[in-house]
Amino acid sequence: MPETTTPTTGPQQLVIVGGGMVARRLVDALRARDDAGRWAVTLLCEEPRAPYDRVALTSYFTGRHPEDLALGGQELWDDPLVTLRRGVRAENIDRDARTVTTSTGQVLPYDSLVLATGSYAAVPPVPGKDLRGAFVYRTIDDVADLREFVETRREELDRPVRGAVVGGGLLGLEAAGALRALEVETTVVEFAPRLMPLQVDEGGGEGLKRLIEGLGVSVRTSTATSKIVGERGAVSRMRFSDGPSLDVDVVVFAVGVRPRDELAREAGLEIGERGGVVVDDACATADPAIHAIGEVACIGGRCLGLVAPGYTMAEIVADRLLGGAGTFPGADLSTKLKLLGVDVASFGDAFAQEPGSLEVVISDPVAGVYKKLVMSDDARTLRGGILVGDASAYSSLRPMVGRELGGDPAAYLLPEGAAAAPAGDLPDEAAVCSCNNVTAGEIRCAVGEGGCTDLAGVKACTLAGTSCGSCLPLVKKLVTSELAAAGVEVSSALCEHFEQSRAQLFDIVRVQGLRTFSEIIERHGTGRGCDICKPVIGSILASLGTGHILDGEQATLQDTNDHVMANLQKDGSYSVVPRIPGGEVTPEGLIAIGEVAREFGLYTKITGGQRIDLFGARMDQLPGIWRRLVDAGFESGHAYGKSLRTVKSCVGSTWCRFGVQDSVGLAIDLELRYRGLRSPHKIKLGVSGCARECAEARGKDVGIIATDKGWNLYVGGNGGFTPKHARLLAEDLDTETLVRTIDRFLMYYVRTADRLQRTAPWVEEHEGGLDAIRAVVMDDSLGIADDLDAAMAAHVGNYRDEWAATLADPDKLARFASFVNAPDAVDDSLAYVGERGQARPATPQERSDASVLIAGTTLEVRS
Amino acid sequence: MTTAPPQTRVRLCALTDLVPERGAVALVDGLQVALVRTHDDVVHGIDNLDPYSGAHVIARGLVGTRGGVPTVISPMYKQVWDLRTGACLDGAGSDPVDLRTWPVAVVDGEVWIEPSSDEVTGSPFDRGVT
Ligand code: SRM
Ligand SMILES: Cc1cc2nc3c(=O)[nH]c(=O)nc-3n(C[C@H](O)[C@H](O)[C@H](O)COP(=O)(O)OP(=O)(O)OC[C@H]3O[C@@H](n4cnc5c(N)ncnc54)[C@H](O)[C@@H]3O)c2cc1C
Ligand code: SF4
Ligand code: FES
């Protein structure tokens, strides 16, 4: 007899249609909260790739690879409760049977279905819209096709390509930026009387137009496109309802979006007046098993074309699926963008639609700045605003919408006003990060109860600042003031002895030419230093090329590793790592290392950095060990220094059947170039001979991957505590440009990073991020390139092996004696036992049971 | 006229054998004593055994000040001690464990130590801290 209630044994089935940003957020949110594994998720993505960052689509043109647009890590897709189906479209929904039919013919049952199909890019019905050379701007494939077309066309025509963007809104200006990046002569054609009609008012539109024309993009407003004329099937000219026609080779439509609601329509669900799947404030349709989220959802009577409200909807549905009662609070349509390098922001009641609003406007056509605040009739409460040309006040002002500003509103529009804008008095419920819906209170809580102690921690735990990044200055301010309130030292002061940060000290020392610690601390600090400032100053002096790290007073700045040029081990002995550039070593070299290890009884291990580590050396043995190594042609590997460690390489084109460049040769050259360069933290490089990436170059601070045309350069990768993949800095460089770019990148990092800050967080926290760093090292945006080049040339020219120099200096050698009153006595506190044929430190128990000891490290091990 | 130091004292080395703001180790009755010369040429004697790691490394630590107090910092796990008293000023996340200090004197450029007999018996390891 069949049972009346089927006990639910396994998880329930959730099918999500559409693999966009909002779908991804739903999967993320659900997996983060569904501890009990109540839902198994299947995600159907029509596009051939996992959800990616559509908002950052345009960065594809500044040299990024599709994978750089990935949202979050692969882990989510490896989750056993998550199934990602790429390149699979949902064709049909059977609401009675609760199944979805896919383009591969599969029928998927669901307990709950979420529509997150986003939008189509709208194409106006103008004749000629289907000609070759007419594009939309929505997916990675769209932009890849656009780029390919422009590049081919340029070669065919043998002249600069001319292009037009239809639509002067947010998307259109993005597309114009993309065309410009492709070196297309660009015109923006807008039907409305001003650019960005939905976000900015007339004054703002005027300012924007001037700025954009100043960048060499033509603008035609109040212009309707009537026809696109073709020649041999390809776009050649545009006609307008009035005004002269325009010769063009490529046209991009960016006139808006249309919700992809066809599945819901066919399934008989209610559709909004202007499209979109109608949902209530729980994102539910009339069918209790079906939700719709993101751009396809018609919520509160309209579809919302921004990612932030979509993310909110995703969170609500995740909550609802787990039995919660979250509702949609209404959308914040504030935007801040950097279009073509021009800051534009609009927030709150930007058009002063609320009755009785006052407007405070500052317009400076010369500087290209237009700013407006919309205030309540008593000029106290902020209602909204528009910022063009300088949007630095955005992150502080937006959360103040609906609150009293305090003081003269105009003051907030001055550059200093932006800096002085509030943070401390921001109410807890004020939304700080609109992309991820994080309030001031949540950030405070992450610092207080959550125990986060820095910006990176707060970002990881609240997600604030992880999307468009426009809120970061405010998030940082909140974190800082919260930490300060909790009594945590958050000034940029290095330590109690110096109020400056490392970067400030670097400048002071460099500019004032100070060369000793005493001078520096007397002039700029207090006391006699500590384990924080001493190594920092030691490193700064070494970076500036002040001679041997053990010369004079500099020796007192080095912690034990740098002081004895070896790595301290748990028992007080040291390890020795000779440099093996690129991991290439001759049989003779290997034998020499082997002999040294055997003679001194050292435990030997291959490191993760493609070289050999010799462990268990007593301090007094180090000079003897190094005498032998130097004689055999080895030099210091700086395994102990905050400096270049290794340049890892794969075997490359010399032997590998897939290699396209000599990765070993380049790795060796780079390792010899940067060896000994003292830096804020250790630096690691990697060179792979082809895209298979066997050298794991993208896990390094600087990673180089060979291409048919040259080298791709990635920066800001690391393993360790917070692993990061390096991001693409430049493509297809020849070797000379590559080396110059790395020179500048490293020198700029050495000069400006914080203490113990690796390249990834440095890039992240650098104002303007990777793009700004690219501008510095490739386009010399700061005018310091010559200086950086000279500094690196000096480093390369002055390099000397620290160990060889030490062996030649009796004063330096004297420091390696075990005892000052018994120079010949050997430290007998070290004790070892044999294991797998080698020595290892004895445990405390083994020490008390003296029979197992093999005593000092020079005794041969009997295994 | 120079006063001869009392017999119980032991001469260890010349002041010039010690590098300012760096430590060195003296063997005193089989025990390791870290000698630390500060920038004002005062020499301090303090345990060389680091109670947190069980390794004899204090003399290799960085020398500095904390709030004006002369300090040495363990090179292993970065605990901080007052060179004058051996008081642990910062346990770096662990409970503070003080170090022993020895009376050290500099007389006519020579460094002397006065081992106190009951304090130096037994292995420092017997103190049961690791
Ligand atoms: C020996 C070695 C492990 C091995 O046997 O393979 C090693 C050993 C140590 N690593 Fe490492 N790391 C070694 C490769 C790595 C790698 C792999 C690599 O380089 O490809 C990584 C991850 C890659 C990276 O750095 O991004 C690595 C990430 C770390 C980290 C974490 C860094 C971070 O950014 O989070 C530390 C801690 C630190 O530097 O603050 C660390 C610190 C250390 C220290 C220095 C810890 C210490 O203070 O005693 C270890 C002592 C080294 C020594 O010789 O006594 N080691 N360490 C490897 C030496 C490679 C070499 O030839 O120089
Ligand atoms: C160039 C550009 C710049 C932008 N800049 C910003 C910005 O600065 N700030 C901002 O807030 N927003 C911006 N947006 C808008 C933002 O990208 C969207 O609001 C957001 O991506 C919407 O997410 P979604 O998941 O709802 O839809 P989408 O990201 O469009 O994802 C929907 C996915 O579903 C797939 N799909 C559709 N139908 C099916 C089906 N039947 N079966 C399977 N799969 C299907 C589609 O192929 C698509 O991949 C920008 C958009 C573009 C194009
Ligand atoms: S992973 Fe940890 S234990 Fe292993 S070598 Fe690195 S620091 Fe030492
Ligand atoms: S507002 Fe976009 S990341 Fe915070």
Image (cartoon, coloured by chain):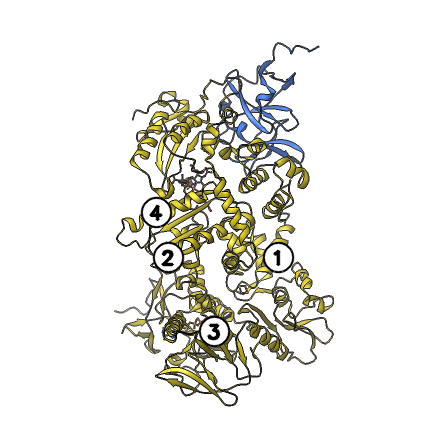
Task: Tell me where residue A143 appears, x and y as whole percent.
Answer: 41, 71
- Disc 3 is placed on an element classified as helix
Quadrant occupied by the N terminus of chain B = top right
Distance between the alpha carbons at the discs numbered 1 and 4: 46 Å
Distance between the alpha carbons at the discs numbered 2 and 1: 43 Å
Of pointers 2 and 4, the one earlier in the residue sequence: 4
Tell whether label 4 touches label 2 (CB within 8 Å). no
Tell whether label 4 touches label 1 (CB within 8 Å). no
In front: A530, or A840? Answer: A530
Q: Which residue is mark 1?
A: A477
Q: Nearer the viewer, mark 2 or mark 1?
A: 2
Q: Residue furthest bottom?
A: A241
Q: Which label belongs to residue A175? A: 3
Mark 4 residue crowding within 10 angstroms, few (<14) / some (14–19) / many (20+): many
Mark 3 vs ligand 2: CB under 8 Å? Answer: yes
Decide if residue A322 is in sight here: no
Q: Nearer the viewer, mark 3 or mark 2?
A: 2
Q: Amino acid at mark 3?
A: Ala
Q: Amino acid at mark 4?
A: Val
Q: Which residue is mark 2?
A: A710
Instruction: Output the chain of dot 4.
Output: A
Q: Amino acid at mark 1?
A: Lys
What color was chain B assigned in the picture?
A: blue
Instruction: Output the chain of dot 1.
Output: A
- Disc 1 is placed on an element classified as helix
Of pointers 4 and 3, the one earlier in the residue sequence: 3
- Disc 2 is placed on an element classified as loop
